[in-house]
Image (tube, rainbow, N blue to C red):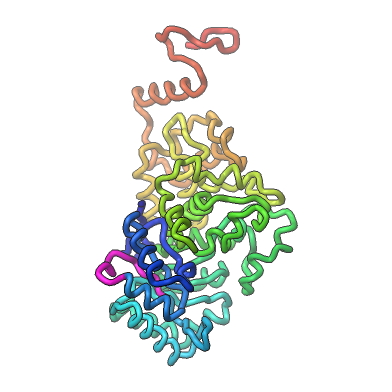
Amino acid sequence: MEYRSLGRSALRISEISLGCEGLLGKPEAFVQDALDMMEKHGANGIDLYSPNPEMRTALGRALRGRRDKFVLEAHLCTIWKDGQYKRTRLMDEVRAGFDDQLTRLGTDTLDIGMIHYVDSLDDWRGVADGDVLPYALQLKKSGTIRALGLSSHNPKVALAAIESGAIDVLLFSINPCYDLQPANEDVEQLWNRELYKGNLLNMDPDRQNLYETCQRLGVGITVMKAFGGGDLLHAERSLAGVALTPYQCIRYALDRPGVASVMTGAHTLAELEENLTYALASDEEKDYAKQLASFPRMSWKGHCMYCGHCAPCPAGINVAYVTKLLNLALAQKSVPETLREHYAALEHKAGECLQCGSCEDRCPFEVSAMRAMERAKEVFGAWCFAVPSKTRLKKLLSRLCEQSGWLLPGKSRTRAVGGENWS
């Protein structure tokens, strides 16, 4: 299992985590087995979306003796009333619901306190200007929660929340279909099939801006609905008309800027184990790029998805990662110290690009990668670029020749180029 830092918080979370909705209605033994399986595979993240009291009690019992092995993402402003889940902003209910959650889970502290389901700007203003946000900040100050989070499906609302500086963690819906849709205060529009009948081009700019801003401000993203409620895994139900695998959906979400963990859903232990073995899957099994490029009526042409199909670079440049750093810098209209440090730490910089075009030949999305390398060299400046030594230049030339099928002088044969032996 791989782990990532959860934004600016001190928390480290597994790339694959568990969303608890699949535990609803299951016997206590199933919950115990699910946590045993997570511990076996090294997964430590659990999102406690469901306010069902029986499920929380069962989970609390399963956590006994190993609470410190898990990162619990608990939701504020949720209650269970008259046999139904309800969102609330009434402070008496908010406090009582949170206290009941602590009791049922058998813990005094929770790692993330998530202000639940803020999908409209009016709701965010009510949370921020009312009593909910001060209450949540007090929980953080007292150590009852270690980080403050917010869940949303609306990129404009989520952006307003994280730009307030109060939010450490964002729980957000990310998958290759939802990412094409503009902001909407009605969450059900994300799976409205009528909105997917036209030709959709590239990621919604508000969503791209949200992910990049989270990366810049140190707000860690945990992902919900990576499988689109399971619809993306079945061709007949998929909004794209093409099925993806769980591994492809997970890899897509993890490639977005700011993302730390995917809260995967599972209704059976077999489904859970499949998700947890993501790290053991081959790159080919995780690869989503060719599948996305085949989506009818949907296109990411010219948009770098950071999928890595541009590799290997004969100069050794991590083209996808350099492009990600470039896009983060362009979104900020400056190069902050953190980006400079990440770029400076790279073994091979954009200025080493040979302009051979091999990356562009392999890109499923027709990204102008050579231009991106030129732009990255301009943006990050000459101070980040060291002129290669003669030895380094010889190695670069050797790699290029190997990829091109040529041989260097002194080898047993050479390849004829333009009617002459190359040397």
Q: Residue at x 40, y 89 (%)?
A: 96
Q: In the image shown, does 119 or 96 lie closer to the viewer? A: 96
Q: In the picture, residue 16 is in which quadrant?
A: bottom left
Q: Residue at x 59, y 48 (%)?
A: 303
**Vertical order, 43 against 281 (above or below):** below
In the image, residue 395 lies in the stretch drawn in magenta: no
**Vertical order, 248 against 387 (above or below):** below
Tell me the magenta residue range: 63-74
Residue 238 lies, in percent from the top left, at 64, 56
**Residue farthest toward the bottom in the current orientation of the protein:** 92
**Residue farthest toward the left in the current orientation of the protein:** 65
Q: In the image shown, does 338 or 154 lie closer to the viewer? A: 154
Residue 345 lies, in percent from the top left, at 34, 44
Residue 265 lies, in percent from the top left, at 49, 63
Decide if residue 39 is on the left or right side of residue 258. Answer: left
Q: Residue at x 48, y 67 (%)?
A: 22
Q: Residue at x 52, y 39 (%)?
A: 309
The reply to whether residue 118 is visible in this rendering is: yes
Q: In the image shown, does 136 or 107 lie closer to the viewer? A: 107
In the image, residue 71 lies in the stretch drawn in magenta: yes
**Vertical order, 305 against 143 (above or below):** above
Decide if residue 259 is on the left or right side of residue 302. Answer: left
Q: In the picture, residue 178 is in which quadrant?
A: bottom right
The reply to whether residue 259 is visible in this rendering is: no
Q: In the image shown, does 399 or 66 lie closer to the viewer? A: 66
Residue 34 lies, in percent from the top left, at 39, 63
**Vertical order, 88 against 40 (above or below):** below
Q: How many marks?
A: 0
